[in-house]
Amino acid sequence: MSHSNTTQEMQARVHKFISQFEEGYFSPLTMMARLTEELGELSREVNHVYGEKPKKSSEAEKALEEELGDLLFVIMTFANSLDIDINDAFEQSMSKIETRDQNRWTKKGE
């Protein structure tokens, strides 16, 4: 299933979902804990797929795609809760990285 959403559409969809609940967005500290929790789940799955730690027979199969999606959802809720446009944040980060790291590695064809 393939969808093409802008970051603004993604943030708006997350906001629409969260806004239907009285509790609303969690505090920044709780959001940080949620982010860490989801990152841990992704780490565990990567270790099962690419590392030396096989799953227990009782553990359900979770795709890396699902774990990345969960992490992205939490990042979107975190950004929304702090009124941060994720596209602006990405542009700032990429500009910094493209400048800082442009000669850090060997470019293809050189």
Image: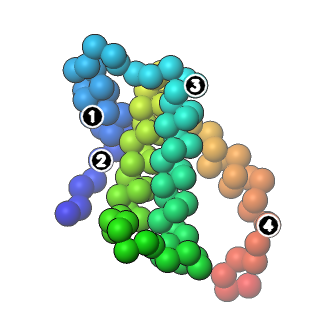
* Residue 104: numbered disc: 4
* Cβ atoms under marks 2 and 1 closer than 8 Å: yes
User: Disc 2 marks which residue?
Assistant: 5
Which of the two marks, 3 or 2, is nearer to us in this view? 3
Q: CA distance from mark 3 to mark 2?
A: 28 Å
Which badge, 2 or 4, comes first in the chain's sequence?
2
Q: Considering the numbered disc 3 on the image, is that residue within a helix, a strand or a loop? A: helix
Q: Considering the numbered disc 1 on the image, is that residue within a helix, a strand or a loop? A: helix
Q: CA distance from mark 2 to mark 4?
A: 32 Å
Which of the two marks, 2 or 1, is nearer to us in this view? 1
Image position, residue 67 (x, y; %): 41, 56
Left or right of 73 in this view: 45: right
Which badge, 3 or 2, comes first in the chain's sequence?
2
Q: CA distance from mark 2 to mark 1?
A: 10 Å
Left or right of 70 in this view: 47: right
Image position, residue 106 (x, y; %): 75, 77
Which badge, 4 or 3, comes first in the chain's sequence?
3
User: Disc 3 marks which residue?
Assistant: 29
User: Disc 1 marks which residue?
Assistant: 13
Amino acid type, label 4: Arg
Q: Residue at 30% x, 37% y: name it.
A: 9
In front here: 39 or 72? 39
Residue sitting farthest toward the bottom: 109
Q: Vertical placement of 50 versus 44: above or below?
A: below
